[in-house]
Image (cartoon, helix red, strand yellow):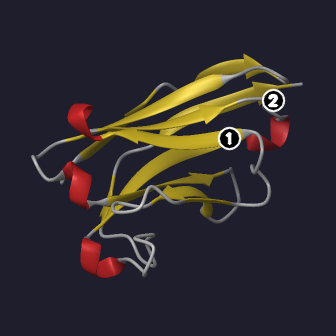
């Protein structure tokens, strides 16, 4: 599967953005999906994930309550709604996909098999 992230931009602290990740192929619904981010000088970190089978979601503590991951299988698209943005959310955001055999009992990924290019999110103070 090929992934294309979009929707990044410059926003003031407290603002919102919605990232999208368009996936190629007909089997999107069978992939568990996730979002990661990488800030300058830092390692890539997990942001959120969504199951392929149960709809279960999982978030990093740093974004819990502010970000929402969702997917529309009919559109082959993954979303990340980001509210109450903070300057520390500034990073390049990446979407990723996991084959069903790379997921746990809830259908959440424990490893990712495919990665998209990133989209830059900049939050000004």
Q: Can the viewer see residue 90?
A: no
Is 16 drawn above or below residue 61 in the view shown? above
Quadrant housing the C terminus:
top right
Q: Residue at x 34, y 60 (%)?
A: 52
**Position of residue 29 in the picture relative to residue 40 (left or right):** left
**Position of residue 21 in the picture relative to residue 18 (left or right):** left
Q: Residue at x 16, y 42 (%)?
A: 24
Q: Can the viewer see residue 23?
A: yes
Marks 1/2: CA–CA distance: 8 Å
- Residue 91: horizontal and vertical position, in percent? 65, 43
Q: Residue at x 37, y 45 (%)?
A: 117
How busy is the neighbourhood of tag 2: few (under 14 within 10 Å), some, or many (20 plus)? some
Is 41 drawn above or below residue 75 in the view shown? below
Local secondary structure at mark 2: loop
The dot on residue 84 is 2
Mark 1 / mark 2, whichever is N-terminal: 1
The dot on residue 11 is none
- Residue 28: horizontal and vertical position, in percent? 21, 50
**Position of residue 83 in the picture relative to residue 4 (left or right):** right
Q: Mark 1 sits on what residue? A: 67
């Amino acid at each position: 599967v090929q992934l294309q992230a979009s929707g990044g931009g410059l926003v003031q602290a407290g603002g919102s953005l919605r990232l999208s990740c368009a996936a190629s192929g007909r089997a999107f619904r069978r992939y568990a999906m996730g979002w990661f981010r990488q800030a300058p000088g830092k390692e890539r970190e997990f942001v959120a994930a969504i199951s392929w089978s149960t709809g279960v979601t999982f978030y990093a503590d740093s974004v819990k309550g502010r970000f929402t991951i969702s997917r529309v299988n009919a559109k082959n698209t993954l979303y990340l709604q980001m509210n109450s943005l903070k300057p520390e959310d500034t990073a390049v955001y990446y979407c990723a996909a996991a084959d069903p055999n790379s997921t746990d009992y809830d259908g959440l990924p424990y490893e990712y098999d495919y990665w998209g290019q990133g989209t830059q999110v900049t939050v000004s103070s």
